Image (cartoon, rainbow, N blue to C red):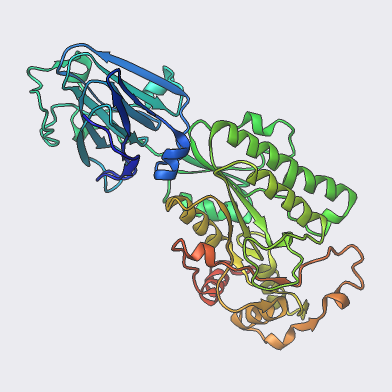
Amino acid sequence: MGGAAQLRVEGSPIQGLEVVSLPVHRDERGWFKENWQREKMVAAGLPDFRPVQNNVSFNGPRGTTRGLHAEPWDKYISVLSGEIFGVWVDLRPGHGFGSLFTAKMGEGQAVFVPRGVANAFQTLASNTVYSYLVTEHWTEAARLEYSYVNLADPDLDIPWPISLDEAIVSQADKEHPPLAQAKPVQPKKIAVLGGNGQLGRAFAQLAKSDERIALYTRAQTDLQSPGFAASLDLANCSHVVNAAAMTSVDRAQTPAGSAEAWQVNAVAVRQLAARCGELGVPLVHVSTDYVFDGAQREVDELHPIAPLGVYGQSKAAGEQAVLAHTGNYVVRTSWVIGQGNNFVSTMRRLAEQGIAPRVVDDQVGRLTFASELARGIMHLLDTGSAPGIYHLQGGGEPASWYQVAREVFALCGHDPDAVQPVSTREYALDRPHLAPRPVNSTLDTAKLQATGFAPKPLSDLLDQFLGQNRVTS
């Protein structure tokens, strides 16, 4: 078969299975092709495939038939000599389970096969050489994760060019189960560090309906432990979400707190990014509006960073460590509200106790509910959005902490006028160790929304949060 004049990558009826047309250069000596060229193929639309092993099978007789095998890794298959009839069946859980795709392949074609899609082929020429690159090293233990489908399954009704009665098929392949009894290949895990934090608990709620999410608490993965990154088992992970951080802004200004902030927010993040980079696992790192000085509102992802305090400085250093590796994400957010101690919970408690708080009225931003932050991160991963920096915070008009406090009092059935406004300067007079904070914490989220993410109305989320987290005396 001839090759394409230009490299092309085209989709198929099976999600994620891509057909590659390869330029093949022929002359009187034979032919030459670039069978795998990462930079060009990624630019053409192929996933950023990172193979670690290359397997080759030689198939002497025409009609040799192998499969259907679904393996726990991605594959890039090609024909080095001869011709095949290729068959693929989706064995991943979901609406696509059982989807079938077939194609003839010669030297001018290749196919990217995502994890969980079963593969088979039948040789249409003698002495066919079949090659496949894979993203994991083969081990005997990995065989336990394989799934199989019978080549002759009547429900699939595969149109084999050469009848299976006349083909050469191994006894093992003849004994594979029908599609109805095939074991679905479960997706890789999304490891979430910081499982006990506000964002981690929001991911725990998502995990109830999404078995991909695996939570790691500080007891399991302590970012203050020098060797934590090397001990992480990420072989079965598609992504890592770092929701762990030292977030005590004021304590970070003290000698002990500063050391902890730099260790957890910068040094450990650098080690984690290096580990993920070594294994080819994309890292999603959650950062903060504190990397900015707050001099301007609605700053976008390209705005220069200028942290005011140690916390922001350590988070900015962590960002740079993550972005030093390709394929990673940094998600900046602000004013996070979730399960646990936070501003909204504190204001509600004070309202219920009849206490009139003094709240700063010259720091402006938007609340970000942890549930929305988790949803937004999963949106980026599920839509295959481009790596890089994204801003994610609640929608609606910006408000000061004072305005938010008044809203909380009102929603809890208490007089919002009980909340007293105070400037940051006045508030800090009897708090000598108060860390500097940006006066503007509003982020431009247009880049994230362009991927299709729509923030839920803040008023609805605040009312829902207060309803779900009632104060009990």
Q: Is residue 70 in view?
A: no
- Which x, y percent locates residue 160? 12, 28
Write the residue at 77% across / 78% down.
362
Q: Which quadrant would the N terminus be assigned to in this image?
A: top left
- Which x, y percent locates residue 211? 43, 44
Q: Is residue 74 left or right of residue 410?
A: left
- Which x, y percent locates residue 255? 90, 49
Q: Is residue 72 in view?
A: yes
Q: Considering only vertical position in the picture, is 141 above or below 228?
A: above
View extreme (top): residue: 60
Residue toward you, 75 or 377: 75
Residue toward you, 392 or 111: 111
- Which x, y percent locates residue 296? 71, 72
Q: How many marks?
A: 0
**In which quarter of the view is residue 69 placed?**
top left
View extreme (front): residue: 28
